[in-house]
Image (cartoon, rainbow, N blue to C red):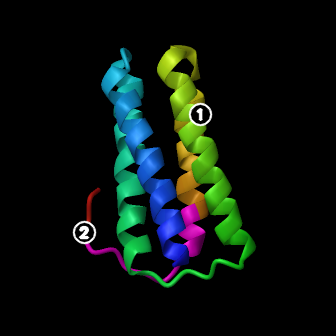
Amino acid sequence: MSNKTIRAGLIDALNQLMRLADGCSDPNQAFELNIKIRELFQKLDRVIVARLESNTPEFEQALVSLDELTKQATVALDDASKVAATIAKAAEAVGKIEKLVVGVAGILAIL
């Protein structure tokens, strides 16, 4: 059951990041966004097969980070100057999720 919350957070963040990447006018930032999108898809792959403990600080931190990432990406859709901050927030979210899925091999190698 707890995996569903992380999955939903990942999917929401991925949807917003893909919208942002599609509308990004700077090709370098679009490239960086697409790298983060791929990394988050890898994490989603691992979260799907992992058994996550929802009562840990790492779980809560990952949820908060995903929520912040989704909000940041939404804001950046209207303000191109916030794309770099969104990329940094995505990197932070990737790190937080990685703490949850330690020892879980992914199904697909995306990168």
> Quadrant of the rendered structure where residue 50 is?
bottom left
Image location (x, y in percent) of residue 79 = 54, 15
Instruction: Determine the image quadrant of residue 75.
Output: top right
Tag 1 secondary structure? helix
x and y, in percent, of residue 76 in the image = 53, 24
Question: Measuring 34% from the left and 39% from the top, which residue is drawn there?
Answer: 34
In this picture, is 90 found above or below 100?
above
For the image, the number of numbered tags is: 2
Residue projecting furthest to the right: 57
Q: Nearer the viewer, residue 82 or 8?
A: 8
Label 1 crowd bin: few (<14), some (14–19), many (20+), radius 10 Å:
many
Query: Label 1 to label 2, Cα distance in Å?
Result: 28 Å
Quadrant into which the C terminus falls: bottom left
Q: Is 26 left, or right, of 79 in this rendering?
A: left
79 on left or right of 56 = left
N-term-proximal mark, 1 vs 2: 1
* Pointer 2 local density, CA inside 10 Å: few below 14, some 14–19, many at least 20: few
Q: Return the mark for residue 72.
A: 1
* Residue drawn at x 48%, y 70% as measured from the top left: 4
* In the foreground, 13 or 82: 13
The residue sitting at 52% across, 56% down in the picture is 94
Q: Are marks 1 and 2 in contact (CB under 8 Å)?
A: no
The residue singled out by tag 2 in the image is: 108
Q: Position of residue 69 (x, y in %)?
A: 57, 42
- Magenta residues, start to end: 97-108
Q: Work out whether 103 lies above or below 20.
A: below
